[in-house]
Image: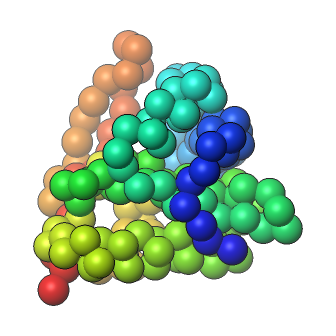
Amino acid sequence: MIRQYKTGDHVALAIVFKRSVLELGSEDYSPEQAATWAEGGSDPERWKRTCNDGRVTFVSELEGVISGFINLESDGHIDHFFILPEARGQGVARALFDALIAHAHEASMTRLYVEASEAARRFFLRQNFECLKRCELEIRGVAFHNYAMEKRLV
């Protein structure tokens, strides 16, 4: 089931984020990188603020448990997209993305863009995003990379 974020979901989003980064992100990033990345989103209050700042956030539920989420800012920026490890391969990511695309069309957006991790890059390439460039960055003193990607909507 896909629905919009509602009050109280922020605790589950912090769990999804942390588990996704530590368990799935560690397939493409070092343990140090994954731990540093996960540290930045462990506070549920951060997700409460983020999901109440005007962006639209969709969450997925599997058997009553939040299993993933994606959010979209008003300018077409996909800021967060994470699923639980056990939700991988069950169509959760695709269902969340489909909800986001439907919203983007309803909002007459002409472009979506994202800074994608390795795993997200593979997903977005399958959704016909163009990879613009690899970006090198640093988070709390740890080197990372991600990819600037975009998709034009017609």
Please report the residue visible at 40 percent of the width from the left and 14 percent of the height from the top.
140
Query: In the drawing, does residue 151 fall left or right of residue 67?
Result: left
The residue positioned farthest toward the front in the image shown: 7
Please report the residue visible at 54 percent of the width from the left and 33 percent of the height from the top.
48
Q: Quadrant of residue 71?
A: bottom left
Q: Quadrant of the N terminus?
A: bottom right
Please report the residue visible at 65 percent of the width from the left and 64 percent of the height from the top.
60
Q: Nearer the viewer, residue 115 or 75?
A: 75
Q: Nearer the viewer, residue 79 or 38?
A: 79
The residue positioned farthest toward the top in the image shown: 141
Relative vertical location of residue 105 with respect to residue 136 in this rendering, above or below: below
Tell me residue 95's x, y (percent): 56, 77
Tell me residue 58's x, y (percent): 52, 61
Please report the residue visible at 15 percent of the width from the left and 86 percent of the height from the top.
154
Relative vertical location of residue 10 with respect to residue 121 in this rendering, above or below: above
Query: In the drawing, does residue 149 fall left or right of residue 97?
Result: left
Q: Nearer the viewer, residue 19 or 144?
A: 19
The colour mode here is rainbow
Q: Please count the marks in the image.
A: 0
Tell me residue 115's x, y (percent): 30, 49
The residue positioned farthest toward the bottom in the image shown: 154
Q: Is residue 26 visible?
A: no
Tell me residue 62's x, y (percent): 78, 67
Q: Quadrant of residue 25?
A: top right
Q: Is residue 66 visible?
A: yes
